[in-house]
Amino acid sequence: MDFRDSPEEAAFRSRLRAWLAENNPGLPVSSTDDEYWARQAEWHTALYDAGFFGLSWPSRFGGHDRPSVFDVILDEELAAAGAPPRPSLGYLVQGITTHGSEAVQERFLPGLISGRERWCQGFSEPDAGSDLASLRTTARRDGDEYVIDGYKIWTSYSDVADWCFLLARTDPDVPKHKGLSAFAVPMHQPGIQQRSLRMINGITKEFGQVTFDGARVPAENRIGEPGEGWRIAMTIVSHEREPGEVGYVARYAKTVKDLEATVRADPGAFRSDQREAVAWAHVQAEMLRLHVRRRLSERMERVDHGPGGSIDKLLMTWVEQTVGAAALSVAGPRALLDGDDVALKIYLYSRAQSVMGGTSQIQKNIVATRILGLPTG
Amino acid sequence: MDTRDTPEQAELRRTARRLARDLGPRTVADLDDDKRKQRLAEAVRDAGWLELRQDGGDGAPLAGGVEAAIIAEALGEAVADVPFAGPLLAADLARRAGARPLEGAVVAFSPDLIGAAVVSGPVTRSRVVAVDCAAAGPASAYVLAPEGDGYRLASLELDGASGGADLTRAVRPLPVGAPLHPIPDQSRLLTGADLEAWAALGLALASADLVGLMRGVLDLSVAYAQQRRQYGVPIGAFQAVQHLLAEARCLLEGAFSAALYPAWAVDQLPPQEACAAGRVAKAYGARAARAVCETAVQVHGGMGNTWDCIVHVHLRRALLSSGWFGDDGEQLRQLQRTRLGVADGLS
């Protein structure tokens, strides 16, 4: 057990720190301001071009073949610099790497990793949220293509996406989990309409809804075999639930750091419960940082696509909602008198964490039945 | 950076868990089995675990905080009724003072359990307590006697019997008026930094104990939920029960991740940083363990509220480990002081 940086890790950390000192784009706190998402692509490509993104992914696709703990260093330094978190698309990389053919990997991974091609994830539908397998969007084979019809919702970044990682029903005659397939669907085509959704904190650039009306996708863009969609979706969501994969630790640590600075400037101006809320948020964020260190250390043995991500997701959710509540507490009446207050937006956005990527209730079902081995009801 | 156990640490983890499981109490009645208790104490002594923090010859301890925490966690998991952290902390304090450890000694704590008792003359307050000591019979406890800028060690003989909330570890009040014995071979005064480094070890061991307790009590609760039937099905099939246990499992994992760091930091980082890591682990672990043990009592239902159901043994032990070196409220107060610049006295 060694928490210290190896010489290689230390060298990487200091290179990254020096780069961040010059290249922090100073974006607003993510998910509190539309400007953040407008400029996120720029941040992605800057991070990538400087050699600081895709650290543990294969170099032939633009990654760096480094041990996964380098992502811990990235998250820690981003937080320390007050820079935006790393783009959270590792779960799509895991899905494509695990299930895509060599040709699919070669075609899609480099653009996904470099940020030159933007992606969204078309899983949820209005009537298929927690019960994802009941989704009704169809993909019908037509020669060398599939024709897509249906409706996706809560699709993050659909407004800027070039590609949609789509889950659709290819076989209506088999049990619901078995009739699904996955596709890389080009978003820029007449059969696709995208509209933004406004989230409860007012931002409009993150959430979308997408209508597929006779949209077409070449059969070679199918990821995995026909009927493999459910397994692919499970691989993806298991990683979408991991803080080590999505890099949110940096976001929480940055908020806590800002809250601490606010209180430190004039401790007497805050009530003891407000100060305690900040101290507790620090404890929670620090726990998650250490938890990610542990998980990514374990990953040096092997990448586990199992149900452990549900534990991580619940931990991450508690952290985000603790941090969000602390931000609201420290802001006090200010957040109530100004509807554009950042603390208010951080707090409101934190309520999404217990829903996105599978609700907390679904995560608890998974932990109970697949990790604790309790009987299914 | 690699937070995994080394092969030696993994082996120690297996050995410690096996020993604690084989010789620890399985039932509340087992707590009265003196022969078993004796075997457990001998096994811990023979394994050399009580000597881990003694001077290895160059001023450094024989084994690291990680190894000590691995054993503490295993003993907590089995609610093992044997002194471990108490004697280990005494040996660690003696080492920092450059003194040979007294056989079987522990450290006396102030009444708030937060730190080592500071005593200038014979003990006048009877609520100064030795923690995790032999339950009865002769034993000694260290106290700190101020001298110049630092502290000199002194020892006291214990005589009272134990009687704390924790049924597996003894707390014994120090006799009022008992004379202080000097520690003649102490070669240097203990500094504030020494005490901070020592407290970091205490926080790490208490946090590890809490992790073990959560692991042990959760295993019992999951097993019970699978076996106990109501409405014709195991109660573990009900989502309401499942979600309680799932939350408990997450709290355990988070507490474990947080507790590894101070155990490592004790020997690797400056005292202040090690202590800060310990405070994070302890604050998280204390709240988590309380919730997990309370869940265990709840899942065990009516049985869980009877003396003969063992889960209250875990809960009681968690209460002592949470309070030892300061509970979650105290850790958050200290973090406010160090991180938010909140001065003492600000309410």
Image (cartoon, rainbow, N blue to C red):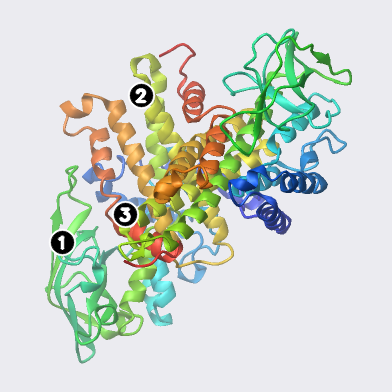
Left or right of A186 in this view: B33: right
Left or right of B275 in this view: A250: left
Instruction: Look at the picture and state if B117 lies above or below B131.
Output: above
The image quadrant of residue A367 is: bottom left
Instruction: Look at the picture and state if A148 lies above or below B182.
Output: below
CA gap, disc 3 and disc 1:
33 Å
Determine the secondary structure under disc 3: helix
Residue A273, numbered circle: 2
Determine the secondary structure under disc 1: strand
Image spot of residue A364 (x, y percent): 36, 57
Residue under pointer 1 = A209
Residue under pointer 3 = B240
Left or right of B254 in this view: A277: left
CA gap, disc 3 and disc 2:
31 Å
User: Can residue A73 be seen in this snapshot?
Assistant: no
- For marks 1 and 2 on the same chain, the one whose residue lies earlier in the sequence: 1
* Callout 1 crowding tier (Cα within 10 Å): few <14, some 14–19, many ≥20: many
The image quadrant of residue A167 is: bottom left
Left or right of B225 in this view: B104: right
In the image, what residue type sits under mark 3?
Answer: Ala
Label 3 resides on the chain identified as B
| Image depth: mark 3 or mark 2 in front | 3
In the image, what residue type sits under mark 2?
Answer: Asp
Question: Is A176 or A259 nearer to us in this picture?
Answer: A176
User: Can residue B158 be seen in this snapshot?
Assistant: yes
Image spot of residue B346 (x, y percent): 43, 13
Determine the secondary structure under disc 2: helix
CA gap, disc 1 and disc 2:
40 Å
